[in-house]
Amino acid sequence: MSSLVGQRVWLVGASSGIGAALAEELHERGAIVAVSARRADRLDELSRGRFATVPVDVTDHAAVLEGARQVGETIGPIDTVVWCAGYWHTFDATDWQAEEFARHVEVNLLGLGHVVDATVPEMVARGRGHLVGVASVAGYRGLSGAEAYAATKSAQITLLESMRASLSAKGVRVTTVCPGFVRTEMTESNSFPMPFIIDADEAAREIADGLESGRPEIVFPWPMAVTMKLARLLPVRAWTVLSSRLAGRA
């Protein structure tokens, strides 16, 4: 029997892509799922009466707190919260876009902080719980053309790692998920090569398998995981040259 059976899961960022596919996968494995995102119509299409739906804008702290309260009233105390929300817009330092940079920070980093504030204190009080954050392998090294995205994903990885150390003695587990390229609405407009790309359904299975096995870090697909982890070992000068070439800037 799956260890997810009967687990009350709040999935934030479930209107499309990995989040939507993961909601389906967790439901199939017996979890009690509540889904949130900005677009209520997308949530209703996804749910079809199977999940609790609570529309939430993650950049609105008060709305996230209220969303967590509604989820708790609907499905009961949240055992696992999964952060899947994300924002991506390509630009680089040669054409800096301050508003886009701020948007990345608001959604990818402050939004995660809002969800943490809405769920983790109660988990600590109960002495159990699970925080799952979907970051990206893009957070392993700086990427030309993805300055804002890579920076916020790197911050997510570091935040989750720090929280894992802080919360382990309180009975609250923290899992970091770092996918490579996944076919979603977010990536469909990318004009650059996306090696080892996988479908969202496959990504959802990878995440669910990792959650069932209790892994603190879930990185996939394995060729991209190996590539980006090795990239972290490259000297700064070597990575600067390689990243520039990959982005067509050298």
Image (tube, helix red, strand yellow):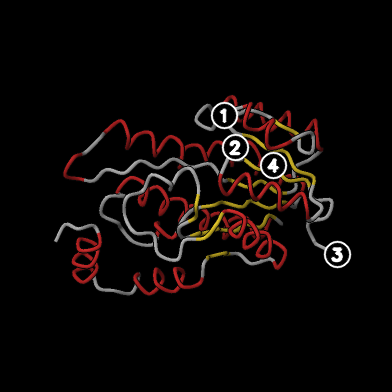
Amino acid identity at mark 4: Trp
Disc 1: CA contacts within 10 A as few (<14), some (14-19) or many (>=20): some
225 sits left or right of 30 in the view: left
Residues at badges 3 and 2 in contact (C-beta under 8 Å)? no
Q: Nearer the viewer, residue 4 or 122?
A: 4
**What's the residue at 30%, 57% (across, down)?**
142
For marks 3 and 1, the one nearer the N-term is: 3
For marks 4 and 3, the one nearer the N-term is: 3
Q: Give the structural element (helix, strand or loop) at label 3.
A: loop
184 sits left or right of 79 in the view: left
Amino acid identity at mark 2: Ser
Q: Give the structural element (helix, strand or loop) at label 2.
A: loop
Give me the disc on residue 38: 1
Disc 2: CA contacts within 10 A as few (<14), some (14-19) or many (>=20): many
Amino acid identity at mark 3: Met
Amino acid identity at mark 1: Arg
Q: Give the structural element (helix, strand or loop) at label 4.
A: strand
Q: Which residue has dot 3 on it?
A: 1
Assign the N terminus to one quadrant of the image: bottom right
Closer to the camera: disc 2 or disc 4?
Answer: 2
**Cα–Cα gap, marks 2 and 4:** 13 Å
Give me the disc on residue 10: 4
**What's the residue at 65%, 65% (across, down)?**
210
State whether residue 245 is above or below residue 34.
below
Q: Nearer the viewer, residue 141 or 186?
A: 186
Give me the disc on residue 165: none
**Cα–Cα gap, marks 3 and 1:** 33 Å
Image quadrant where residue 37 sits: top right
Image quadrant where residue 176 sits: bottom right
Q: Which residue has dot 2 on it?
A: 15
**What's the residue at 79%, 40% (across, down)?**
77
